[in-house]
Amino acid sequence: MNLVQKLPIGLGLACLMMMSSCSKEDVQTPAPAKSERSDANMRDEGGFIKVFPIFNSTFGQLGCNIHPNGWSRSGNASSNAVGYPTGNSSLAYLFGNPAWPWEKALPSIPGALDANNSILTVSTSTKINVIDFEATAGKRSAVETKIKNLKPGKLYKVTFWATTTVSKVKQNNKIQAYAHALSLDWIYPDGKENALVLSLNSNNAALWKTYSITFEAKHSEQVLTFTAFTKNEGEFAYAHLFVDHNSIKEVESPSYPNP
């Protein structure tokens, strides 16, 4: 089922105008990341350079349908970039546009290792359907990134922050609401597998919460997607994701006592 709903013409045109008018002067350059890797700890016991796994951060230019390096709009949800936009927002404004402030500005992200100047935003107007997940694809957007330098069979832990908030820009005939859930899915060459479904209820709306998932790598590179859902069908909501520069690490397999 491919149900696509469009935002009002005014908001859609504003989004497109913002994309076409982006200039170097409008771009906010992220602060350089602090590196904790010295020459000593970048080499293994044999003296060879270690290859670290890569989970791309959400640092980058702000804008409607503009994404940080290593991220893109996912083809596993709606292709309607006007009706269901994605892009990099600031803590105060939807897609960094001062004309689109949040009803409640987001706070700084607690525990993040780097300055948080940009967050990834997805949009949705559908509730989760556990019986037919794909039936909702036309009414929500998604973003994805490729996690690289994995060792198949090894365990990894990825950490990120997520929240939801409401824009002051009202939309005709649509009820603005907080996003209710965030879904993470692995995209493999032979299919898709759900990684995690997070609850984003009103208790943590406009407040950041840290999440993590531990997974066993199946391939050296794996695509991870993020998409959102509302509590009630037809509500329109935004969900936000933040990833810093040190959000993935290899972890030891749990040890169990012999029977």
Image (tube, grey):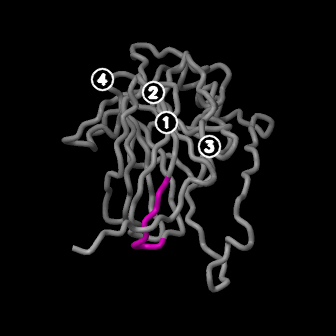
Residue span colored magenta: 151-158
Circle 1 packing at 10 Å, graded few (<14), some (14-19), many (20+), is: some
Disc 4 to disc 1, C-alpha distance? 22 Å
Residue 139, position as x, y percentages in the image: 36, 33
The residue tagged 1 is 209
Circle 3 packing at 10 Å, graded few (<14), some (14-19), many (20+), is: some
**Label 2 is placed on what type of residue?**
Asn
The total number of labels drawn is 4
**Label 4 is placed on what type of residue?**
Asn
Q: Is residue 182 left or right of residue 103?
A: left
Among the two numbered marks 2 and 1 on one chain, the one whose residue lies closer to the N terminus: 2
Disc 3 to disc 2, C-alpha distance? 18 Å
Q: Mark 2 near mark 1, Cβ–Cβ under 8 Å?
A: yes
The residue tagged 2 is 204
Q: Mark 4 near mark 1, Cβ–Cβ under 8 Å?
A: no
The residue tagged 4 is 232
Residue 224 picture quarter: bottom left
Residue 130 picture quarter: top left
